[in-house]
Image (cartoon, coloured by chain):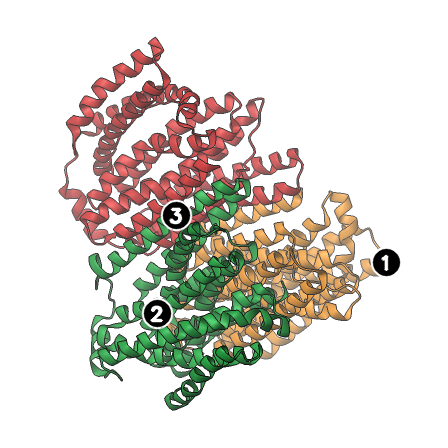
Chain colours: A green, B orange, C red
Amino acid sequence: MGNKFFMILLAAGLPLSVAGSLLDWPSVIMFIIYCLTIISLASFMGRATESLAIVMGPRIGGLLNATFGNAVELIISIFSLKAGLIGVVLASLTGSVLGNLLLVAGLSFFLGGTKFKRQKFNIFDARHNAGLLIFAVVVAFVIPEVFSMRMKETETMTLSIGISIILILLYLAALFFKLVTHRGVYLPNKEEGKAEEEEEEPEWSKKTAMTVLAASTVAVAYVSENLVHTFHTVGEAFGWTELFIGVIIVAIVGNAAEHTSAVLMALKNKMDVTVEIAVGSTLQVAMFVAPVLVLVSLFFPDTMPLVFSMPELIAMITAVFLLIMISNDGETNWFEGLTLIAAYIIMGIGFYLL
Amino acid sequence: MGNKFFMILLAAGLPLSVAGSLLDWPSVIMFIIYCLTIISLASFMGRATESLAIVMGPRIGGLLNATFGNAVELIISIFSLKAGLIGVVLASLTGSVLGNLLLVAGLSFFLGGTKFKRQKFNIFDARHNAGLLIFAVVVAFVIPEVFSMRMKETETMTLSIGISIILILLYLAALFFKLVTHRGVYLPNKEEGKAEEEEEEPEWSKKTAMTVLAASTVAVAYVSENLVHTFHTVGEAFGWTELFIGVIIVAIVGNAAEHTSAVLMALKNKMDVTVEIAVGSTLQVAMFVAPVLVLVSLFFPDTMPLVFSMPELIAMITAVFLLIMISNDGETNWFEGLTLIAAYIIMGIGFYLL
Amino acid sequence: MGNKFFMILLAAGLPLSVAGSLLDWPSVIMFIIYCLTIISLASFMGRATESLAIVMGPRIGGLLNATFGNAVELIISIFSLKAGLIGVVLASLTGSVLGNLLLVAGLSFFLGGTKFKRQKFNIFDARHNAGLLIFAVVVAFVIPEVFSMRMKETETMTLSIGISIILILLYLAALFFKLVTHRGVYLPNKEEGKAEEEEEEPEWSKKTAMTVLAASTVAVAYVSENLVHTFHTVGEAFGWTELFIGVIIVAIVGNAAEHTSAVLMALKNKMDVTVEIAVGSTLQVAMFVAPVLVLVSLFFPDTMPLVFSMPELIAMITAVFLLIMISNDGETNWFEGLTLIAAYIIMGIGFYLL
């Protein structure tokens, strides 16, 4: 899949990123360099994760992937919180949810669907995820939005803290459920899965894969942080609002890792991993990254309540219902992918015009 | 099914419609004549479509039906747009969605359910339709509603145009998916279906059926247009608001064709066709008729954004969720039909009182 | 299951309740006595219902249970309406819906799930209930909320009356469907169910069970009515708002009967009865108790429209979607129960802070 291309891109991009940020090159040029570098790094993360997924099974592989993808977001968001940019943090959380549910899943289903007529994945996982998506986005994000309309600021913050703690606890309980009490309980196609897994050989050994993954993550974090500082100038140059940058641009670049590996897995018909990346990543953002940021914000001058703007909230809710409706039969095709992409474009136009 | 009754009704109604409209008879009398004529014409359209459905298979038959039913609506709406009646057009689009999802499907499920204990239909189609309903009504209609609250009028119109183009493209992609790339891929009960189809003989030949269908369509269009002009006077006479006329009356009379043939098919236990008519027709209105009208309105002095009133939007969203919840197990019974009808009556009372 | 404990609790609680209310003991003390008495009475109701469920089958048993649980609520609400406390009535209806869907079902699924890895129940009932939940809460409760924003008070009341009549008629139709036309039609695991039922012996005979049930109901009603009068003082003592008392406290104590027996059934892996109690009880509140109260309010000076406050409505809608998403695969586990409980706690915090 063009591994050499990404190798060259990285070999050029990483030094240019460092040089450019030290020498203060123009923001618009640096923006493009940073983006390409992150995307090339993401391809290495994707390959490393793929290797790990083969070695350690699709579940842990998917989990690892989501974690490494979102570590970047968590770091960027903490820097933004420190700078008091609460609106940007909420926008990039929204963008992560929309990007994963609609763009990552959409592209994977679409591109995978051009190779395979019907792609199946574990229906039990799909339902488990659907319940959590409704819990996180439709219950935990909607309640503070509606209730805060009649609340004072301190009450809204108290409610946000309470919900954040519950979200994190339930997220941990979900891991306990998946990895301990109900590990391997819900496997509809046990035999096929096993046979498929044993066949394949990982590109890298576990050690190499983990080293590549760790190094890429550090590099992505370094480049991402520089990238953020170009947004303001780039926004002015291209006529993009901060909301659009947060929701769309940060999400696309920030989730490039997920994009790449989710699509790679879809092209190999390993939809369990694809869905684990797209939806698992969304759940991690909604149930872990977002509440952690609310709690972290308590140590900064500007606290962040768990209250999105109405367009952000409605976009997330409708994205959740669309993804659930499309994925809860445990199979996908190119048209379902296209539907998700179409929804993403509609929301993109909306945020661009806001 | 009282074919002779409809024959007589038509033989009386059509000349009376022409005579009455030329001689300028009182609106309330003409209203009743027009309605009865359309209903009798609809019965012919139903029979013709039924014949075609047998000859050409349930899928194409259902598609044909939806097309012919909505051609009438498209024509009426373009005339209304030309007259600047944007509120009436949006109301009749709403009425079409509600009428098809709740009244057509409800009556079909209910009446079919009085003959058969459990009626089954293709569960894959049900899910495909569910995804598109969520896409069209919950994503594509909700986003402009919420986002436009913070937008200027020109931005709302730009968003509406963008969404309209995406809706039309996805609608065409859906046809491509259904008729080309995935034709016959999702057939759970292939054998039964085939056996059933081959057994039955069409009432009319393909040629006769198409001629009847074409002639009826032209006649329906003619009568419908006259019917529209009686609404104002009739509304005053009966104390109906324009919203109620648009949402309820236009929808019932305008979708009489779908009503008749969907119910006829349900009584023959051909639920695949019934669902194709009810839901397929809704999707055509939401993904094709509505966006085409938005684009057509650009050529008229008053442009129409894709922004419904809040009661219209909420009614459509709740109707979509109710229908999906009731139909996504791939079977129906009389009680599910009654539930849909009850929802329709509740909304009818609401629009009557608004 | 600690039957002796409840026996002692009742033997102490009932006389103390009577004595305390006659001798005018302090409200906070009486509040605790009343609550414990109701909970002990509820355990007897639970055991009686359990016996009846064995004798008369899970369906009638569940129905009986829901009826006896909600008779208490109906009586309390009518007294509240008479006193003009419309806000409290709507709050306690909301609390009943939330308590049954999230707390009763959540505790049952969670505790049952600690004993059994996967618990199954009739998937057809789950879907039937899901359709009715959407109809009642998402259609019948949302429409008056949205439409009444543009209506005069008399129109809102007319709409409320119309919807109430439709809800009651559809509720009766649902009983007719379940008990007459489609009795025993939807039984996926006929053999297992029968075998299980025949094995077990009821604790009490039908006569004894019914006597216990009747006596407990009268006693619960008596204690509940006294309990209500302590709320104001208790609210002041603990810093609880009337909304919080209505939505959370009344619901927990008022639904103690359902709680007890639903959990008991879950621990015996009879999830059909558990779901029948939790969801059936919700449907009875939404489709029977609420509309009857609207109609009864016409005979009092202050009429009650079917218009909840926005936080109440949103809480109910999100609870319905969460429960449906979790239950519509026909099986549960401890994590699904925990998710429902977490949602309940989030809403509890919200109503506490409002």
| Vertical order, B77 against A14 (above or below) | above
How far apart in space, not on screen, are marks 1 and 3 (Cα)? 55 Å
Q: Residue B23 carries which label?
A: 1
Residue C248 placement: quadrant: top left
| Vertical order, A10 against C89 (above or below) | below
Crowd around label 2: few <14 · some 14–19 · many ≥20 (10 Å): some
Pick the front one: A219 or B343: A219
How far apart in space, not on screen, are marks 3 and 2 (Cα)? 41 Å
Pick the front one: C302 or B281: C302
Q: Which amino acid does label 3 sit on?
A: Asn
| Residue B313 horizontal side relative to residue C29, left or right | right
Q: Name the residue under label 3.
A: C129
Nearer to us: label 1 or label 3 = 3
Q: Which chain carries label 3?
A: C
| Residue B228 horizontal side relative to residue B310, left or right | right
| Residue C282 horizontal side relative to residue B27, left or right | left
Q: Name the residue under label 2.
A: A68
Q: What residue type is labelled 2?
A: Phe
Q: In the image, are marks 1 and 2 on the same chain?
A: no
